[in-house]
Image (tube, grey):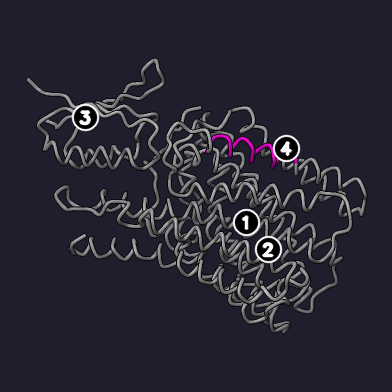
Amino acid sequence: MRRALDYDHMPAPATPLAYLLAAPWFGAAAGLVAVWHGPDVFASRWHPAALAGVHLVTLGMLTMTMAGSLLQMLPAVAGLPLAGAVGGARRAWMPLGAGAALLAAAFLDGRAPLFALGAGLLAGAFVLLLACLIPTLWQRRRRAPAAVAHVAFGMRAACAALVACIAAGLALAAWLAGGPAVPVPALVDVHAALGLAGWVVPLVLAVSFQVIPMFQATDPFPARPARALVPLVLLALAGWSAGRWLDAGWRMSAALAGAALVTLYAGIAAALLLRRARSRAAAGTGYWLLALASLVAAAWLFAWPGAMSDARAVAVGVCFLLGFALSAVNGMLVRIVPFLVWYHLRERTAPDVRVPKIADLVGPARTRAQCRWHVAAVIACLGACLWPALARPAGALLAVACVRLGLDLARPVLRYRHVLRGGTP
Amino acid sequence: MTTTTLLDLRALPAPEPMERVLDTLDRLHGYAELHVLLDREPHPLYPILARMGYAWRAEWRPDGACLVAIARTA
């Protein structure tokens, strides 16, 4: 499998950077919700404060990063130039961020009009985004090169699951806003499964098939599992969702199959990272290893037969959202943002203008320190599922880790503007 | 006679190879041809090379490495 990229159709740097720079501040807000509400956030997945924190992470941090990354990677990784309403997608980060903040406020406040306003903004944001992503992913004139066809498939699958997840979420938000009744427990479970196992997992897997070898200097991901994993995970998700909707016991078999599949993925990816020829670890390796271990832990905690207590359900969420998804996103952000800044500086400045080195934009020591803060936050949040007294310190650690990340990403962009205005690098 | 400098940048994580190539070109000031061994073709490097006044040719070798030869345009 060749690791080929197409940079002929790279979007302007502001397009992905607006999303990528905004994302960490929603993680910080989720941390502050835990500081403010304390043990309630980790007491039950149904608690309003927990729902507020979860949606700040899933919409504000994860979807914000994943949407920005897609706008960058569709042309650069999947070989699909942006099509459709590109201008709207460039601006969708604003209603997406405002909608995530309003939805979190609605959960905390409980007033129906806030749910309606938040859901309306989010619906608008997703319409703007999908009006670009769908024509780009399913364009007739241009197909993804054969070497990355499985990456494009994973992106398509993730976007299809996102559409179903949004539909379920909007139905629930309409009910909370005083609209028609819906089967709440089943719809919430399917909404969560579509968002986590349908939107997040396929996209992270598909992107990692390219970016782990490229940014971590490993051997290529083996072709056969790379082609098969995403479709099989989707099959397991479809089986579990159907079983949950019908309240059938056999859905546990689908959950166990899904857990086995992500364990296989994590094993292959970890082996690539740990067996690479180069002894020096590339920046971001720690994030990837934590993400892989957390994905396996979340999958088996969820799938293993037995009663799903509140503590167990919250631990699944912490392992998946903070341990897996946020770690993978952190690892990507600390590599991609400095690279984008450096690349566009080299491309836009005169050849005789000195451009800062990538390591000077976000240094390896700073990245390692950031990773330690993130690991501490994940461990503390996991601890808070069992020991409620840890809830506030855990929230504070998460907020600090995300603020540090936000500042680390903003600094290179400020230097970029400074150099373009003729300042010294 | 033109001298040739060879850089083996295989097994370096992106984007280190691109940064090293540009640093080396800055040091050579166009007085030598630069040959670079990579494990992928450096597409993002090409627009920058063109802006800096360099020409390049890339070929895949039987051992799976991509050899990129870079020289100042006349």
Element type at marker 4? helix
Chain on which label 1 sits: A
Q: Do the residues at discs 4 and 1 belong to one chain?
A: yes
- Amino acid type assigned to the residue bearing label 1 in the image: Gly
Left or right for A245, reference A82? right
Residue B33: quarter of image: top left
Query: Quick check: marks 1 and 2 in contact, CB under 8 Å?
Result: yes
Q: Pointer 2: what residue? A: A382
Closer mark to the observer between disc 3 and disc 1: 1
Closer mark to the observer between disc 2 and disc 4: 2
Closer mark to the observer between disc 3 and disc 2: 2
Q: Pointer 3: what residue? A: B70
Is A53 located above or below residue A74 in the figure?
below
Residue at 40% x, 51% y: name it. Answer: A11
Residue A382 point in image, percent of width and height: 68, 63
Q: Pointer 4: what residue? A: A232
Chain on which label 3 sits: B
Say which mark, if any, is on residue A323.
1
Residue A272 on the magenta segment: yes
Q: Which residues are magenta?
A: A260-273
Element type at marker 1? helix
- Amino acid type assigned to the residue bearing label 4 in the image: Leu
Q: Residues within 10 Å of mark 2 (few under 14, many from 20)?
A: many
Query: Quick check: marks 4 and 3 in contact, CB under 8 Å?
Result: no
Residue A227 point in image, percent of width and height: 63, 32
Left or right for A34, reference A366? right
